[in-house]
Amino acid sequence: MPPRIVYLATADARGHLMRAQLLAHSLRAAGASVQVLTTSDEGARFLAGFGIEAPVLSRHYAVQFDREQNMLRRETDRNVAHYMFRPGRMLRDIFRLRAWFREADLVVNDSFHPALLFMGWMPGWRNKVVHVYGDSLRHALESNFSGRMPGWTAKMFGRIVAWQIDRSRARIAHDFAYGAPEHDGRGGHRLATPVAVVGADTEPHDDLAPQAAVYLNPHFEETALADGLERGLADAGVPAHLVGEGYAHRTGWHAQDEHWIEMAARSAFIVSAPGMAALSITAVYRKPILLLLTDQPEQAINAERAAQLGLQHRTVVWRGRTEDFAREVATAAGELLALADGGTHAMEGREAAVARLQHWTALLSRLAARR
């Protein structure tokens, strides 16, 4: 019987969903049975664009952001507390998940859904759960209350969360800059973040003007920010392929593009918030990137690591002033344009992307088969 895997991908950001669809397709091609679940109707529609049918587990749990992708900490804490302690929310989801557990050899939690955090340390369930997370996300979660609660309370929260995570069957920490797979011998694994694979015919197009490949996740909805970004790129003389669900109503923007990776691999540079997926694409396809930074703890950590590791990038911070933002974007775009090399690394990147997917597929298949 083929291994049976349930993959729960939270819909807070599209990186979790993108990873889910990549791995689901790869695991199915390797002979596994994979059922993807998610946490919002928008997330289910996103996955459907990649041919993945994903039932919505719960519409009550979500990290909260404003229209500028600034994380709303108090609102998030309140939402999580209501989810965990109100009858008919997390408890209901646990009862629903029990049915999936009975049929599954492995249950993947991508990333840190509270119901699976709970089930991942409970006897009888924990031996099927593997947590998938970016290292920066785990750090942000464990330090969530640092500076907002008394020091001992914040540390206790972090230790409890770490204990819950480490009780599970396995953990897969991923990062855009990891090299060869590593295993600590106690269920902890380190893998390079998987990325989409470009087509075998993706080559640079000398007849096309250098272009920026822009992707902004759905939390970006502020009109003034989009105005500044568009104006800055235009002032730098850079055409842009614009993708962002929050700006789908704007002229020139697309809500979703299943083939965005092809544009990114051919682009002069990428424009995105410093999520793990965007930085992984940058590293694999060797593209410069313009990082759009807002108040999002995980992404701030990623931006710092990008700088430490020497990734070709520029950072602009949205502070609510369109004119200043446009000037900063134009300056950064001009500097990145000077680093552009077209799509000359697309085929090397393709090989690296295939290798990353193979590592993930082999590990998850092995974990499921051991059941």
Image: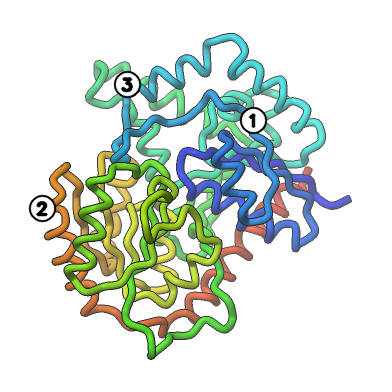
Q: Amino acid at mark 2?
A: Asp
Q: Position of residue 235 (x, y in %)?
A: 17, 68
Name which residue lies at 38% across and 61% down: 252
Q: Are marks 2 and 3 in contact (CB under 8 Å)?
A: no
Against 132, is 175 above or below? Answer: below
Residue name at image x 33 percent, y 68 percent? 240
Is residue 278 visible in the rendered image? The answer is no
Front disc: 1 or 2: 2
The spot of residue 58 in percent (x, y) is 60, 27
Name the amino acid type tagged 1: Leu
Mark 2 element type: helix
Closest to the camera, between mark 2 and mark 3, is 2
- Would you name the residue on which mark 3 appears? 74
Q: Amino acid at mark 3?
A: Arg
**Residue occupying image coordinates x 51% and y 34%:** 112
Between discs 2 and 3, the one toward the N terminus: 3
Disc 1 is placed on an element classified as loop
Residue wearing tag 1: 57
Res 205 quadrant in image: bottom left
Residue sitting nearer the eye, 78 or 94: 78
Position above or below: 219 against 126: below
Identify the residue position indicated by label 2 in the image. Answer: 324
Q: Earlier in the sequence, mark 1 or mark 3?
A: 1
Residue 241 in the figure: left or right of residue 146: right
Q: CA distance from mark 1 to mark 2?
A: 42 Å
